Image (cartoon, helix red, strand yellow):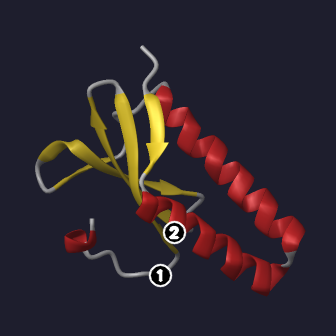
Amino acid sequence: MKHRVVLSSSAVSDVNEIFDYILAEAGERIARDYIGRMRDFLQRLELFPHRGTVINNDSNMRSVGYERRATVIFRVENGQVTILRVFHRGRNIDLDEI
């Protein structure tokens, strides 16, 4: 069964911030390529959403790494995968932010 994948407003902001950071550090082509691969990765959660590590003993909330540079926090419920946050590189993850 395919799940619908949606990004929360916080996740959209996170992805935009990551793009801006990479754009400033490495240029437009690299930033667009990285974000494009990330979006493809997130969309593939539609087919296998129960991957990653369970967070806080909540079987619906999970985390998964992306290219060893980002951590994706998401929730799987009722046929939908909601991307809650995308933390890039060494950013501290405060579960109270989610």
- What's the residue at 88%, 66% (across, down)? 29
Left or right: where 80 falls relative to 5? left
Q: Which class describes the residues within 10 Å of circle 2: few (<14), some (14-19), or many (20+)?
A: some
Q: Quick check: marks 2 and 1 in contact, CB under 8 Å?
A: no
Residue annotated with mark 2: 14
Residue pictured at 79% horizontal, 61% vertical: 32
Mark 1, Cα crowd under 10 Å, few <14 / some 14-19 / many 20+, is few
- Work out whether 47 lies above or below 57: above
Figure quadrant of residue 15:
bottom right
Position of residue 97 relative to residue 41, above or below, is: below
In the displayed structure, 31 sits above or below 25; it is above
Where residue 17 appears, as percent x and y from the top left, is: 59, 75
Q: Tag 1 or tag 2, which sits nearer the N-term?
A: 2
Above or below — where is 7 with respect to 35? above
Q: Amino acid at mark 1?
A: Gly
Residue 88 position in % (x across, y down): 52, 72
Q: Amino acid at mark 2?
A: Asp
Give the secondary structure at mark 1: loop
Q: Please state the horizontal and vertical placement of residue 27, each as a whole percent of the image.
A: 86, 77
Outermost residue toward the bottom? Answer: 25
Residue to which mark 1 is pinned: 90
| Residue 5 as seen in the image, left or right of residue 76 | right
Dot 2 falls on a residue whose secondary structure is helix
The picture quadrant where one finds residue 72 is: bottom left
Q: Nearer the viewer, residue 37 or 77?
A: 77
Q: Residue furthest top?
A: 1
Quadrant placement of the N terminus: top left
Mark 2–mark 1 distance (CA, rounded to whole Å): 14 Å
